[in-house]
Each structure stands twice: as structure tokens, then as C-alpha cells.
Amino acid sequence: MASLTASSKFDYLQGTPEADRFNGLDGNDIIYANSGDDFIEGDTGKDKICGEQGNDTIFGGADDDIIWGGKGGDLISGNSGNDTIYAGAGSDSITGGEGDDIFAIAKGSGGPTVGTADYITDFGNGNDKIRLL
């Protein structure tokens, strides 16, 4: 497992095909996890996070983040800030946290059968919206 840590400035972190651990720290970072079951913490800053493939655990941070879950059954939490979260393919559990969040859900993003749906665990800590793509 690779461990990638950003600086307090803008950083671009790209993972390996294996399971990786990311810490964005401060700064407006771009984190691209690649495949593998990754653990991603955006921390502070307006981050763009892409889980890509694998069953990822993704935490945004205190600012307005954009998060793509990608393929796999992901656990996604935007934390505070006005976040935009794209679930992606797979059965995802999504929490926006504090702020006015947008949950972007595409047709078939959860999967083709019952039991593979995406789940939004909080809807109401602010003016949250669901955007159907």
C-alpha cells in the first residue's frame, strides 16, 4: 500500500493500481486514486477527488469539494462545505455532511438490480439537492 501525502499548496496525487492511502492536507488538490481499494482524505482546500475503480473510502474536507466515486462500492463523505458528489457505478453510501450539497446520480449508477442502489445517508443539513444525470 502506497501512502501519498500532499503539501499545503496545490498538489496532484495519482495512485497505483494497488490499494493506496491519500492525505490532501491544505491546498486545492487533485487526487486520482486509480484502481485498488483506496482510502482518501481531502482535508482542507477545494479538492477534486476521483476514486476511480475499487471499493474506496473517500472523505472530502472543510471546503467545497467535487468528488467522483467511480466504479465499485464506495463510502463517500463530503464533510463540511458545499460539495458536489458523483456516485459512479456500484453500490455507494453517500453522506454530504454540513453545507448545501449536490448528489449527482446517473441512470444505472448503482447497478442493474435491486440491492445495488446508491444510498444517501443524510439529506437536509442545509439545502441539499439531487441532480439526475
Image (cartoon, helix red, strand yellow):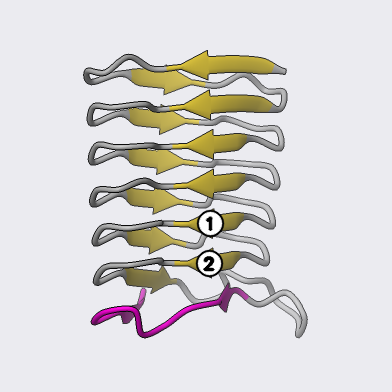
Q: Which residue is drawn at 46% across and 17% down?
A: 5
Q: Nearer the viewer, residue 101 or 43?
A: 43
Label whose residue precedes the other's in the sequence (2 or 1)? 1
**Residue placed under numbered mark 1 in the picture:** 76
Above or below, comparing residue 90 to residue 32 in the picture: below
Q: In this view, does 86 lie to the left or right of 117?
A: left
Image quadrant in which the C terminus is located: bottom left
Give me the disc on residue 94: 2
Quadrant position of residue 106? bottom left
Callout 1 amino acid = Ile
Q: Which of 118 and 39 is in front in this view?
A: 39
Residue 95 percent across, percent down from the top left: 49, 67
Q: Residue at x 24, y 72 (%)?
A: 100
Give the residues in magenta: 118-133
Residue 124 percent across, percent down from the top left: 36, 85
Callout 2 amino acid = Ile
Residue 79 percent across, percent down from the top left: 40, 56
Q: Is mark 2 on a helix, strand or loop?
A: strand
Q: What element carries label 1?
A: strand
